[in-house]
Image (cartoon, rainbow, N blue to C red):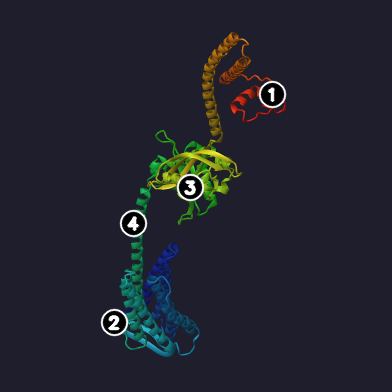
Amino acid sequence: MEWNQSFFTVCVAAVTFYVGAFHFLFFVQFPKRRENLAFALACAAIAVYDVFSAGLYSAGSCAEGAVWQKRQVLALCFVGATMVWFTSEFVAGRVRKADIPFFVFWALMVPVLIFDRTYLTFTDYPLEKHFTLFGISFHYYEVRPGLLVDIQSFVGVLAAYHILRSLLSCLRQRCRPEAKPIIVGMLFVSAAVVNDTLVSSGVYSFVYLIETSYLWMVICMAYALTREHLVTQKALAVSEEKYRHLVDSLPDAIFITDERGIVLSVSGAAGAVFGAAPSEMAGRPFESFFHADSMERVKKFIQDVVARSSAAGDIIVVRGLPREGRQIWLSLSATVSTSLGGGRIEVHGIARDVTQRTIAEEERARLAAAVEAADESIIITDTNGVILYVNPCFERMTGYARKDIIGKTPAILQSGRHDRSFYSNMWATISSGQTWHGFFVNRRKDGVLFEEEAVISPVRDSTGRIVNYVAVKRDVTQQRLLEAELRHSQTMEAVGRLARGVAHDLTNMLVIITNSIHLLQQKLGAQDETVSRHLSNIVSAAEKAGNLTAELMAFSQKAPMSLREIDLNKSARSLEEMLVRTLGPSVPVARSDKSRAA
């Protein structure tokens, strides 16, 4: 029985080409995995070689067989190159330096095989082979290969060794466990190359095995790549499950919408963030899950993200649907993504509940506004006293602009009225964590002194460590002046009360003295001129004392003062006799007009 090897070889070529096309589609889907492209090209080269082999097996003469032989060897150049390339991509992910000599040799052999008309490639020595194996008759019409073809066959053996060595090294390093079936396939190919080289050279008669070995090689390589793909798919499924679990465990909601804003999918946190289950949100407009005041803004946000088509995400804060009677605030960030499928545009984003943060920010804003509007000077420093913040009242009170004072210390305000111990005590108090109360006499930028009341308190962080000091100061210059005036007024009032009491008692005594002198004058009459004159002086002095007490009474009662003219000469003369008696005869008393001297 004669075996139709051509039909079998064509079938092998068809299977090989189909496997190559399948893996080429793999490469199109995953372009970074270049081993699929190398394998697809290797399958194409092997399929072409199988077709040329079918032509050889159906040749009716040695001359016709020689044409197919040359085509076979030409195809083997591409088979060898793609097999070496596939191995390098499979084990290293790149072309290696050791591959270059093989590529160069096969590249040079291609034009030689095409244009050579000498016996370097094929001789004209016919090799007609006819034999029977296992009851099956085989008939080949060939010619003996030339020197270059024999060298190419030897290079093919070296390439097979290079491939096997690379695969075994990869297997030992456990970088690609999928290399095992490829090693088995390469052993088949290596054995077939040796067999076919010996058969082609006429050493012995046997059936050509290269096509069958290539088929086994393709099957082994396809198995390795498919197994790798399945392992990758399984790992991807596990990774996706982990990712889904991670996403669902996040407190933030991950959402995906199309370019129109229709919800495609939402993570498990949607219930906590939006108040709706993921199944309820799918297929509905994204803006419908926000407060009516924010719906239009959310819709425009999605449109703007799609229109911009940038990788950088936008962030907005909007009102969510109220829950349990309280207002909800949500922050949205999103980016545009193009799906790997048909290029569909999707919006991927994160929604976060920022209600507490928004409330805190509003409180901070109110506090900042209150500090800015405060009528007290507020200063914040670090622990070294370097000024970090002052409010507008500080600028008005001191004359220093905020930009001029930031980075300096409050020592710039010192007037020199306080000694070093005053400031040391203050720092000791606030450094120990206590609040200091006191007064400063400081100097404005224009040099004018002013007095201020200050309360300085330490500010602690969450660990209790002092990180800042805050001073609240109030200008008390006018208050101090008013207090001084009040104290003076109180003093004068006390003096007035004392004067009123003294004047009252003194008036009573003067009345007694005056009345007694008048009685004495009436009794003595003009008996003694000297005594009469002294009594007159006593009466005059008593009258003056009475006038003085009257003025004291008027002062104590805050009565209006009456002004009158007085004779200074008369007042001076009234004192002359008293001075003469007091000083004695040894000290002369002279009048200013020198009319008389005592």
Q: Is residue 352 visible?
A: no
Give the residue at x 48% y 83%: 108
What separation in Å lies between label 1 and label 4 (alpha carbons)?
A: 125 Å
Q: CA gap, disc 4 to disc 2?
A: 53 Å
Q: Position of residue 243 (x, y in %)?
A: 37, 53
Q: Residues within 10 Å of mark 4 (few under 14, many from 20)?
A: few
The residue carrying mark 3 is: 420
Residue kind at label 2, given as amino acid type: Leu
- Residue that numbered label 4 is attached to: 238
Query: Sequence-wise, which precedes: disc 2 or disc 1?
Result: 2
Q: Earlier in the sequence, mark 2 or mark 3?
A: 2
In contact (CB < 8 Å): disc 2 and disc 3: no
The percent position of residue 533, horizontal first and vertical second, equals 63, 16
Q: Nearer the viewer, residue 380 or 40?
A: 380
> Of residues 415 and 87, which is closer to you in this image?
415
Q: Quadrant of the N terminus?
A: bottom left
What mark, if any, has residue 133 been given in the picture? 2
- Which residue, given by chain and number where applicable, does mark 1 sit on? 569
568 or 393: nearer the viewer:
568
Amino acid type for the residue under numbered disc 3: Arg
Using the numbered discs, state the Cα–Cα distance from disc 3 to disc 4 in whole angstroms. Answer: 72 Å
Q: Position of residue 447 (x, y in %)?
A: 60, 44
Residue at x-position 43% and y-position 87%: 148
Determine which of the numbered discs, if any, sits on residue 301 in the image. none
Query: Is residue 241 depicted above or below 507 in this figure?
Result: below
